Image: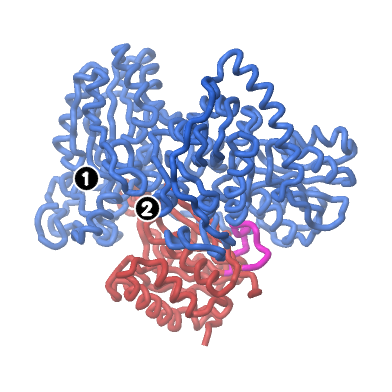
Chain colours: A red, B blue
Amino acid sequence: MTVKEFNILMCGVGGQGLVMLSKVIGDACARAGIRAITGEQHGLSQRSGSINIHLRIGEQIRSPLIPVGGADVILALEALEALRCVEYLRDDGIVIMNSRVQHPVWETESHVKDEKAKSFSAEDVKTRLLRVTDKVAALNALDIAKSVGNPLTENIVMLGALSTLEDLWVPEGAVVEAIRINVPKKAIDVNLRALKLGKGAAHSDLCNVVKCKE
Amino acid sequence: MGVSDLTKDGPAKVFMLCNEAIVRGAVEADVKVVSAYPGSPTSEILDSFSSVANHFDISMEISSNEKVALETCAGASMAGLRSMTSMKSVGLNVASDSFFSLSYTGVKGGMVIVVADDPQAHSSQTEQDGRPYAPSAYIPMLEPSDADEAYRMSRAAFGISEKHGAPVMLHTSTRVNHQSGMVKMGKVARTPFRRVRWDHPPGRFVTVADSARSFKASLLERTKRIEEDFAKSEFNVVSGEDSDIGMIASGAGYNYAFDATRILGIHPAVLKLGTTYPLPKGLIAEFISNLSTLMVVEELSPYLETQITAIAKDANPQLRIFGKASGHLSEALEYNPNIITEAFAKVLGLKLPVDYARILRRAKELKRGLPERWPTFCPGCPHRATLHALRQAMKGRKHVLATDIGCYSMSFLPPVEYGDTLLSMGACMGVAAGIQYAIEEKVIAMIGDSTFYHAGLPGLVNAVHHEDDLTLVILDNEVTAMTGQQPNPGSDITAGMKPAKRLVLENVVRGFGIEDLTIVDPYDIEVATSKMSEALSRKGPNVIISRRACALHSDRQKRRRGEEIVPNTVDETACQRPYACVREFNCPAISIDDDSRKAQIAQELCDGCGVCARLCPFDSIKKTREGERG
């Protein structure tokens, strides 16, 4: 199936399930006959380091890395990381970010040294991103994930929000099937609930700024 | 992708990681023996093999190091079975002694050696280019650019190896290994595993003096024959337009170059090289003969460019070649589509469709004040506690810390910033031995269990024999943690979860003649600190083993057993803000609230190790649920 080229820069902190998320989306594309490639990050930053994964959809694409200014969407599983990869966003691109902040140890250390030091907040991130695009949506994926009963489904909540985008032509059925195949058996139901609630959150926070599927 | 796709009967189109595709290719080629030591970006090759080894009846070892792994495969292939090993480019340094000799003796069964570079040194000590090993050792080399090609090359390499009796190197790099894409898998037609007869005359695989000289003569002939075959190889592809502008690229570089031509809307003639040793010189000469301009795209050293420039001297002396020598591309860092697009635009005098410099400037401006997030130790990581104890134990005493390769290497990063030297696997003791000759202060060497078994043993033997005054700290966390918690000689399992004999670290150390041995549990941080302080006050050589399982590994095991992981929490009424839980500890689960300025613990990150609770002088950190001391 030939679809419009579409580039998603996924970022977050090691341990948030970014590799699993890219597997699910890539697998969903494969099931729908859509060509996708990813540039992944494995290795050193297993936990607590910055991670980004490039996911590219399109027949002609060869580079697993998105060029600077080439991402249609930044999907950030952690708020600070959304800003950290801002150079990849194309002008007027979409940012879907988790409002959760994981404070880097470097920041915490600076709070010890300077009692007036303030944390960099999700609001700070949003304000800066709005200088590049007005299509910024933040959702509290951790709270949603906790509400379905497993904080580790945060990645699938974000996928739910992403999947509402009109430009992401991956059928619902393929996404659901890819989740069923890739997550542990006993976690299938909780992940499908997370997907649904992620979509719901998108309809209230994202679809007012970008075109969503019906 | 998972085990189910690797074991699926083809033909089928599957989305998979390149490292998994390499495994699938080898499985289809009926590989029988696999041995490897993990190392990024190749670790998932080992992990994937490990997950299907039993299913496909593959004899597999997770070796103690790359050299042993290569030799294990060499032995199996000398006997006549097909074998595969994989290693990062710096791993080939360790294996290189046998790598060179093996080219001389050759093999009978097909043998494939996967070697992966890590441009940008994402998780390596250098950006070493592994390709020059191929011509130095006369070992044929294939280079894929994506998962499907890696699968096809992996499958084909065994046949090439058997036909010419030479081991074949499959050379990749991080952005190839860690790329997922569609792979058109073929059928799996495995033959039953059966032992073969050793049917070689005596001395067949002995290379020394006379036999070495005779092997050398025949391997030169062999290389000529392989070059003839490679001139017709399906892995070298000419495409694009009939243009006087051309491009030669290989590996990851090809992907960026291909996208750069699309971004700029240019249509050069393209030669994609897949067989990069021996180079198909005739094919290259023909390709460049009618060009006026050639762009060469390859990461790291100008391996292709130098040879192509030499070929052009005869084939097309007027050809203008652009790449590293012309200053358009660098030998440092990994490439990406914008770097190559900018280089092409400059060579051809084209305007960039996107102003990359402007975007990067704007991003830098937007990120002002954004706190850095260097990789650090996981919540619950025993290394954090060991390093804290070590620092406290040495408080007020000047010392030098020679570290080694593993998760603990990260100790030099901010905000921990501890550690003075790091060279290569197992280097800490040799370096420490040299430093103790040179300085007055205490010298400490630090190494993980897996690295100790990998290349640390000779260093310890040396230190004991020479009575070097150093203290060796071995961080024993039961697994090879950094690459994905693979088993190591200290584990009671190996590949495919098969039982293995567990080496007892203290017995090994004592067996080498260490009499002064201290064993601590870093979670018991007060005791660990005082015991370490005592040991560090004594003359070396002596050894401290800091023993506690990798937190990721043990948390996973706990979850499997259905055991609850209870995090800790800060009792705000008790917290007097001494920040003992932060200073020189720096756990990512702990942060400081902007308003109350008190420590807080992120419940979903904390693994409940309780070390911070022990550090708190006001007892303000408790288990979240039982309300007891952490």
B428, A209: nearer the viewer: B428
Q: Amino acid at mark 1?
A: Ala
Q: With B349 as the anchor, is A133 left or right in this view? A: left
Q: Residue furthest bottom?
A: A214
- Residue at 15 percent of width and 37 percent of height: B526
* Foreground: disc 1 or disc 2: 2
Do the residues under discs 1 and 2 have CB atoms within 8 angstroms? no
- Could you tell me the amino acid type at mark 2? Ser
Q: Which residues are magenta?
A: A58-72
Q: Secondary structure at mark 1?
A: loop
- Name the one closer to the observer, B40 or A32: A32
User: Do we see residue B374 in this rendering?
Assistant: no
Residue B159, given in percent of the width and then of the height, sits at 61, 44
Secondary structure mostly taken by the magenta-highlighted segment of the chain: loop
Q: Is residue B158 above or below residue B197?
A: below
Q: Which mark is residue B357?
A: none
Residue A66 is a magenta residue: yes
Q: Nearer the viewer, residue B388 or B150?
A: B150
Label 2 environment density (alpha carbons within 10 Å; few <14, some 14–19, many ≥20): many
Q: Which residue in the structure is indicated by mark 1?
A: B580
Question: To which chain does the residue with label 2 belong?
Answer: A
- Residue on which the image places disc 2: A48
Counting from the top left corner in percent of width and height, residue B620 is at 14, 53
Q: Position of residue B561 (x, y in %)?
A: 21, 58
- x and y percentages locating residue A2 in the rendered image: 66, 74
| Real-space CA distance between mark 1 and mark 2, rounded to the nearest whole angstrom | 21 Å
How packed is label 1: few (under 14 Cα within 10 Å), some, or many (20 or more)?
some
Judging depth in this view, the residue of B460 and B363 nearest the camera is: B460
Same chain check for tags 1 and 2: no
- Above or below residue B33? Residue B603 is below
Identify the residue shown where x is 48% and y is 29%: B94
Q: Is residue A108 located in the magenta-colored stretch of the structure?
A: no
